[in-house]
């Protein structure tokens, strides 16, 4: 990592560009004056004083009165903690606000919506989010072992602990064995039903939420190729969920 990379990272954590450059320079110099920092930090001397005030307000430097003033940076671990906590606090404030205004001007047009999600990681995140809202039952079908591990398995276990009935359907014996070991109900799917371009996974939650993904069988294991559509609490989802549940 270069000075420029460190400066960019610090600006991502909330420092101004001059503040970040000044802090990098201070860490190199230790106790120093504004003019000394300006020589090594690529910051005009006239801007160093403002940058020092910024760092002082954040608790990142101590100031020794005198002529000239001298500045001492806090150690790296203390700076890490201060910036992480500040970023966390700002994020929580922002997300609390978003939660308070979410949907306040929503119209009717989204109520029968069908949404699409691309890429295995994003689809897994959507699956776990839908499972987190399960109240009574969920059905999950896949023949790809990788699609029932990690965050998905954790979400299923959390749902089961809440009293949700979890059913895993698969043509792959390893998937069913893993599900049985976790205490879930399993259903065997006929492997002959798998098409060349087939279903990656199907999720049905509480009879009114459905997600279905497509993953070419030749690319199983390459999650980047997975595509899904999903719908939550809509008439379409209820009808499709009913059709899926009839099969299992």
Image: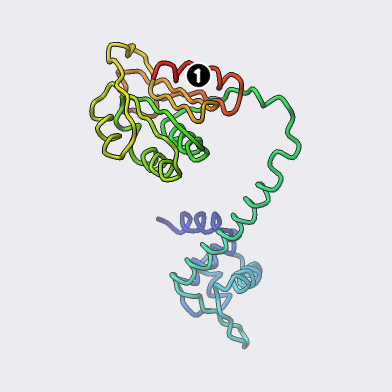
Say how many tags the image has: 1
Q: Quadrant of the N terminus?
A: bottom left
Colour option used: rainbow
Q: Residue at x 44, y 31 (%)?
A: 138
Q: Position of residue 184 (x, y in %)?
A: 34, 35
Location of residue 14 by image quarter:
bottom right
- The answer to which of 52 and 37 lies nearer the viewer is 52
* Residue at the disc numbered 1: 242
**Along the line of sight, which residue is nearer the eye, 70 or 217?**
217
Say what secondary structure mark 1 lies in.
helix
Q: Position of residue 104 (x, y in %)?
A: 74, 40
Location of the C terminus (image quadrant):
top left
201 to the left or right of 40: left
Q: Is residue 150 above or below residue 232?
A: below
Is disc 1 surrounded by few (<14), some (14 to 19) or many (20+) residues within 10 Å? Answer: some
Is residue 93 rendered to the left or right of residue 206? right
Q: Position of residue 100 (x, y in %)?
A: 69, 48
Position of residue 41 in the picture relative to residue 222 (left or right): right
State the image coordinates of residue 209 (x, y, percent, origin top left). Answer: 53, 27
């Amino acid at each position: 990592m270069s000075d420029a990379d460190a400066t960019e990272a610090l600006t991502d954590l909330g420092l101004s560009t001059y503040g970040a450059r000044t802090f990098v320079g201070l860490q190199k110099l230790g106790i120093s004056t504004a003019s000394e920092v300006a020589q090594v930090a690529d910051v005009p001397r006239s801007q160093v004083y403002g940058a020092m005030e910024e760092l002082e307000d954040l608790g990142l430097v101590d100031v020794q009165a005198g002529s000239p003033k001298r500045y001492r940076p806090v150690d790296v671990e203390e700076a890490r903690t201060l910036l992480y906590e500040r970023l966390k606090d700002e994020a929580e404030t922002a997300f609390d606000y978003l939660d308070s205004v979410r949907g306040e001007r929503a119209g009717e047009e989204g109520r029968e919506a069908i949404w699409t999600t691309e890429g295995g990681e994003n689809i897994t995140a959507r699956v776990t989010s839908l499972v987190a809202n399960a109240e009574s039952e969920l059905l999950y079908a896949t023949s790809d072992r990788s699609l029932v591990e990690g965050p998905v398995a954790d979400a299923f276990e959390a749902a089961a602990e809440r009293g949700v009935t979890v059913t895993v359907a698969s043509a792959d014996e390893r998937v069913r064995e893993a599900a049985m070991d976790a205490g879930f109900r399993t259903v065997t799917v006929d492997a002959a039903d798998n098409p060349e371009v087939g279903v990656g996974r199907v999720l049905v939650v509480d009879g009114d939420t459905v997600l279905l993904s497509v993953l070419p069988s030749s690319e199983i294991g390459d999650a980047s190729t997975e595509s899904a559509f999903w719908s939550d609490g809509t008439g379409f989802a209820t009808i499709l969920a009913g059709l899926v549940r009839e099969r299992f």
